[in-house]
């Protein structure tokens, strides 16, 4: 089987592709030859190649929020990307193309249609962005994270699968996660992860809240490269007996371990939270970004509406410390949120999407 992957713009579009690839490999009775086709301006190449997957650069660009000159440049990048994708896909000859959305997926998805290659499109978010809105007309089959997305997708060719997450979420226990981190069973833990690139507003609010939070909990903070120096300064400004309770890092590959061990999480509301918060059964505060349309707010509303998270708007970010403290002090509410999150978990999501991909490839 020859599988082409495409997607990009954020890690939230790359990680699902890699998770589904692993599920395809686990289920396929024959070797799987795979190549990822997408842009590399947001770290996609590093993520893909670190997973041992061949990467082919296909230019692309977003259209949202562009002025006339920006739109012209983006249109030129998209055209160049479609031409590159046609050339490279024709050479690779995939049995199926799997798209995880984001503006980086559009050239490969359109090329698949032009080359008459079957296309499976996955919508990670609750609401589709412009790329998936276009690709739903090109797709042979579609899969999506939530039932809430069905009103935006062609019902006859769409199946709800959940969001595919890393196996660690379902193979590691909470006690084992805490043991890996050296956290005592009765210790409160807060994990903060703004996004793959960090989030300045969240970082700044956390720095201000540390004197109040650290006496209550150990705080693990993924800052992004741009925020780590300020985080280290904030740590040094804490009383000496509290410094060990604040653990900042620009990036942590063990985010699933942190989330499983935590009592409260603080995140943006990219697509990955739709799978990872339920998988970790983690009560969370979500600060939806105001960029890239309203997709983060829609994701946050879905989790909030299902009782798994609470929303804090960025304009109210100064209240972050108080909101987290309220949850740390309310065991009953956290238990309720944890149960609600757990009820949304879909441990079979990657396998369900892989089944669709393999069915389409065999036709």
Image: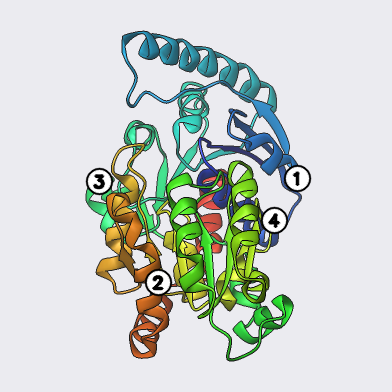
Compared with 113, 237 (above or below) is: below
Work out how far the residue at label 3 is from the one at label 1, CA to CA, in angstroms.
34 Å
Q: Looking at the image, which residue is at 60% across and 83% down?
A: 174
Compared with 167, 233 (above or below) is: above
Q: Are marks 3 and 1 in contact (CB under 8 Å)?
A: no
Residue at the spot of label 4? 25
Work out how far the residue at label 4 is from the one at label 1, CA to CA, in angstroms.
17 Å
Q: Closer to the camera, 361 or 314?
A: 314
**Residue 22 visible in this rendered orientation of the protein:** yes
Looking at the rendered image, the disc whose residue lies closer to the viewer, 3 or 1, is 1
210 vs 320, left or right, is right
- Badge 1 marks a residue whose secondary structure is helix
Q: Residues within 10 Å of mark 1 (few under 14, many from 20)?
A: few
Residue 287 pos. (x, y %): 36, 55
- Badge 3 marks a residue whose secondary structure is helix
Q: Are marks 4 and 1 in contact (CB under 8 Å)?
A: no
Residue at the spot of label 3? 152
Residue 274 pos. (x, y %): 42, 61
Q: Residues within 10 Å of mark 2 (few under 14, many from 20)?
A: some
Q: Are marks 4 and 3 in contact (CB under 8 Å)?
A: no
Residue at the spot of label 1? 50
Residue at the spot of label 2? 324
Work out how far the residue at label 1 is from the one at label 2, CA to CA, in angstroms.
34 Å
Looking at the rendered image, the disc whose residue lies closer to the viewer, 1 or 2, is 2
Work out how far the residue at label 2 is from the one at label 4, CA to CA, in angstroms.
41 Å
């Amino acid at each position: 089987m020859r599988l082409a992957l495409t997607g990009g713009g954020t890690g939230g579009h790359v990680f699902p592709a890699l998770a589904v690839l692993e599920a395809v490999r686990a289920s396929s009775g024959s070797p799987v030859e795979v190549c990822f086709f997408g842009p590399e301006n947001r770290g996609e190449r590093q993520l893909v190649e670190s997973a041992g997957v061949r990467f082919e650069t296909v230019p692309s660009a977003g259209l949202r929020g562009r002025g006339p000159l920006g739109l012209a440049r983006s249109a030129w990048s998209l055209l160049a990307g479609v031409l590159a994708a046609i050339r490279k896909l024709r050479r690779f000859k995939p049995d199926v193309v799997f798209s995880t959305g984001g503006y980086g997926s559009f050239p490969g998805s359109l090329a698949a249609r032009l080359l008459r290659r079957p296309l499976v499109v996955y919508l990670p978010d609750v609401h589709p962005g412009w790329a998936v809105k276009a690709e739903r007309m090109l797709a042979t089959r579609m899969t999506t994270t939530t039932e809430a997305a069905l009103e935006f997708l062609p019902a006859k060719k769409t199946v709800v699968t959940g969001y595919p997450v890393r196996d660690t979420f379902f193979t590691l226990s909470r006690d084992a996660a805490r043991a890996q981190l050296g956290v005592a069973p009765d210790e409160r833990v807060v994990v903060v992860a703004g996004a793959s690139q960090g989030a300045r507003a969240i970082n700044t609010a956390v720095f201000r809240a540390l004197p109040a939070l650290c006496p209550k909990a150990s705080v693990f903070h993924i800052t992004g490269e741009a925020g780590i120096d300020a985080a280290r300064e904030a740590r040094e400004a804490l009383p000496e007996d509290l410094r060990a309770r604040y653990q900042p890092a620009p990036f942590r590959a063990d985010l699933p371990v942190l989330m499983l061990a935590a009592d409260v999480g603080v995140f943006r509301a990219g697509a990955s939270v739709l799978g990872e918060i339920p998988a970790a059964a983690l009560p969370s505060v979500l600060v939806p970004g105001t960029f890239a349309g309203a997709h983060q707010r829609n994701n946050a509303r879905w989790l909030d509406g299902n009782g798994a998270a609470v929303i804090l708007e960025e304009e109210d970010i100064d209240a972050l410390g108080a909101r987290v403290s309220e949850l740390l002090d309310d065991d009953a509410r956290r238990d309720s949120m944890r149960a609600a999150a757990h009820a949304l978990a879909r441990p079979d999501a990657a396998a369900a999407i892989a089944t669709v991909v393999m069915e389409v490839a065999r036709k």
